Amino acid sequence: MDESNGQEPIQHDQSELQTIECARDKRWRSYLNRAARQEPQALADLYDESSRLIFSIAIGILGNPADAEEITLDVYTYVWRSAAQFDSSRASVATWLVMLTRSRAIDRLRTISSRTDQSGMNRSHNLHGTPVALTSDDSSRVFVVRVLEQLESADRELLEHVFYSGLSHSELAIKLEIPLGTVKSRVRAALGRVRKLMGEC
Amino acid sequence: MSHPEYTQEELDALALYSLGLLEGDEGSNLDEHLSAGCTDCESHLMGFHRAAASFASMLFLL
């Protein structure tokens, strides 16, 4: 199956970004190792380099800076306590942090929704809005733009809903007006395209 | 425990599961299957996690 959308691969930029990401992961793993030995400066270094990303995920899901800040603090508290449990054979540090943040932010979103008796279908979410400054270098950003251009807009929209909305599988099907089975197959295909486009360390 | 091959439906379910979106019996069954130690499914899950995290990171970089 061609999961790259039949377009030309972008090997040059991809390898540059992979080099940057692999170096970053090596650095972040070192911070985690030191944090596991209870070195506060290691957590501070990890926070300095990763907190803008973490905050952007949290606010993308919650849409509220105060809640997003609380989730961000919660994530780093967890990291401090659980650094020794991180298994680098299972995921990069960035993947671990992003998925941890998403999970906690969605739990918070569901709690807020149940308290306010809102239907999940009416939850709004801020997909891109973030008050944080961007710190990525131009080459990374150019690569990202090109990768996202290779995803069909429908795939990108679907992944944004899947990642940020906190809606369940069946709620997504209703919201997007597509059958349950189609949600599944499209999510898998879209993630497969991202995997293929991004490569791995 | 491992899988010689996956059907599209199994991969679809793993993709949703990786994002915590698989509901009902299907989700419970996959929970049990993973608890039994299926390394192939774990490997697929990690791949889907990486993709989802990469996608979110890309949006952040824009």
Image (cartoon, helix red, strand yellow):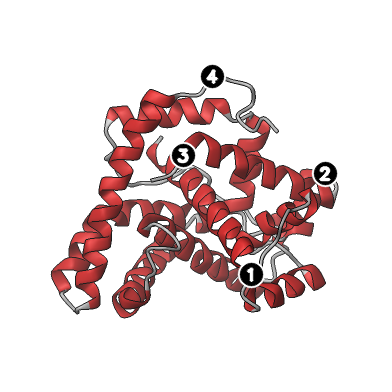
Q: Amino acid at mark 4?
A: Glu
Q: Amino acid at mark 1?
A: Cys
Q: Residue A4, relative to residue A106: is it above or below?
A: above
Instruction: Say which of marks 4 and 1 sits in front.
Output: 1
How far apart are the two marked residues, 2 and 1, measured between alpha carbons?
A: 31 Å
Q: Amino acid at mark 2?
A: Ile
Mark 4 and mark 3 residues within 8 Å of each other at the beta carbon: no
Which image quarter is the N terminus of chain A in?
top right
Give the residue number, with chain letter if any, for mark 1: B38
Q: Residue furthest front?
A: B4
Q: Mark 1, residues whose alpha carbon is within 10 Å: few (<14), some, or many (≥20)?
A: some
Chain for disc number 1: B
Q: Residue furthest right?
A: A179
> Tag 4, which secondary structure?
loop
Say which mark, if any, is on residue A8.
Answer: 4
First of labels 4, 3 by sequence position: 4
Toward the viewer: A186 or A53?
A186
Q: Position of residue A191 (x, y in %)?
A: 61, 44
Q: Position of residue A148 (x, y in %)?
A: 52, 31
Q: Mark 2, residues whose alpha carbon is within 10 Å: few (<14), some, or many (≥20)?
A: few
> Tag 2, which secondary structure?
loop
Toward the viewer: A135 or A3?
A3
Badge 4 and badge 3 both on one subunit: yes
Say which mark, if any, is on residue A178.
Answer: 2
Say which mark, if any, is on residue A199.
Answer: 3
Q: Position of residue A84 (x, y in %)?
A: 31, 77
Chain for disc number 3: A
